[in-house]
Image: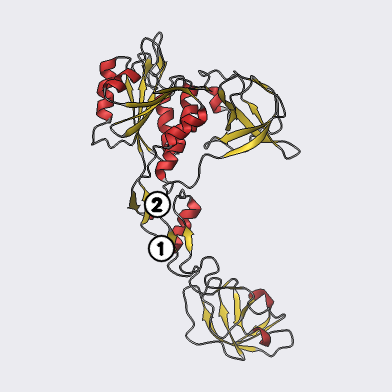
Amino acid sequence: MRTFISFAEALDTVLSVAQRGPSESVPLDQALGRTIAEPVVAPSDLPPFASSAMDGFAVISSEVGPDAPPLKVIAHIAAGDVADTPVEPGTCMKIMTGAPFPEGADSVAPIEWVARHEHDEVTFSRAPDPGKHVRPAGEDVAARAQVFSGGERISPSILGMLASLGADPVSVTRQPRVAVISTGDEIVPASQVPGPGQIRNSNGPSLAAQVQAAGGIATGPWHAPDEPDAIRELITSCLSADQGHDVLVFSGGVSVGDHDHVQRVLNELGATISFWKVRQRPGKPLLFGSIQGIPFLGLPGNPVSSAMCFEVYVRPLLFRMLGREESPQTVNAVLARDIRKVDGLHFFTRGIASVSDAGTLMVRDTGPQRSNLYGSVVRANCIMHLPEAGDHVPEGTLVSIEWLPWADRVASDAGDSQ
């Protein structure tokens, strides 16, 4: 078992075990937020036929103009109609927006250009250029073109495109099932009033929500007191075939205290421990390994450590398992004020990034960064990655930030560096 390894080594180790899940077909109306499993190819042109971009008249442009003779209106084409004859010299057809463009015509003269329309004859004040106000077939997507490569998260706009392509049902990657397990004698449900020495279970619900936000399915959150037998029973239950878990995430019980039993119980159950402890803050006592082929991460029990370790380790792992083309997004920002840190530890500092009046992306910390202060996560829209070396990061340093997926990318207090 490796111990006290670097953040980069720890992350590479976690991601190395990721295996993309199998695909499944789901109805399109249930696909929002899912991940496209395989390439999607257009079966035909989109739009499938040339159509009018305006309400007006389908005309031969060379026959239209202020001095041109009247044209005979021989048909009225509404959306959904198809003209059964072509436009011939001396004729035109009234056409509505979205209606199929008839043969013989080369443009649409908008209804606003009509100079006179009496009975079945019409004249125009101006002439359209050839092709004007006509939407060509295949203008958006050509037949047999690959529209999606697989790995895209299905947003409302992507869902709309899938519907346009007739991709219903759609092939998506099966969502990883993640068991969220909290430990601690002091833990009570969030709905319960804590007694002396007790705290509400915030890690369980918040980690389950983070699993869902990352595209997984959270089971639980489960809870076990600081008793080896209870922890063993819960782990054994989560490993049963009928649960079908792909990942186990523990919160608490992985440090060196007298009541931290998770690692010992996992060892007794035959787990392989890949590493324990990482040169980082928060979350130094991070535990990672596998049991019965299922990867597990033991996150520290402090709520900030738990949340941050999930974002920098578990979310990328779930993305790999989903085959997502995206990854947690990092950009560079200028540090708005000095930060003190511990030399030799990679810091995950909760930050507020905003754009200055000069258009520069700036970032500052959210205030006190102790691992029990969950408000530092609530206020943040990003995580600052501060490398191991050094104990002081001065104002003006270019630092790497990772956006928190649930937060606004542009802070409301832009330019504030207090």
Q: Earlier in the sequence, mark 2 or mark 1?
A: 2
Identify which residue, 351 or 290, lies in the foreground: 290
Compared with 243, 182 (above or below) is: above
Mark yes or no: residue 298 visible: no
Residue density around tag 1, few if under 14, some if 14–19, many if 20 or more, within 10 Å: some
- Mark 1: which secondary structure? loop
Question: Closer to the camera, 246 or 126?
Answer: 246
Q: Residue at x 39, y 23 (%)?
A: 1
Depth check, front residue: 304 or 7: 7
Foreground: disc 2 or disc 1: 2
Q: Few, some or many C-alpha atoms within 10 Å of disc 2 (few <14, some 14-19, many ≥20)?
A: many
Number of numbered labels in the structure image: 2
Q: Which residue is mark 1?
A: 166
* Residue drawn at 41 percent across, 47 percent down: 34
299 horizontally vs 346: left or right: left
Q: Are marks 2 and 1 in contact (CB under 8 Å)?
A: no
In the picture of the structure, the residue carrying the numbered disc 2 is 37
Coloured how? Answer: secondary structure
Q: CA distance from mark 2 to mark 1?
A: 16 Å
Decide if residue 296 is in sight here.
yes
Q: Amino acid at mark 2?
A: Ala
User: Quick check: 246 left or right of 412?
Assistant: left
Q: Position of residue 355 (x, y in %)?
A: 69, 37
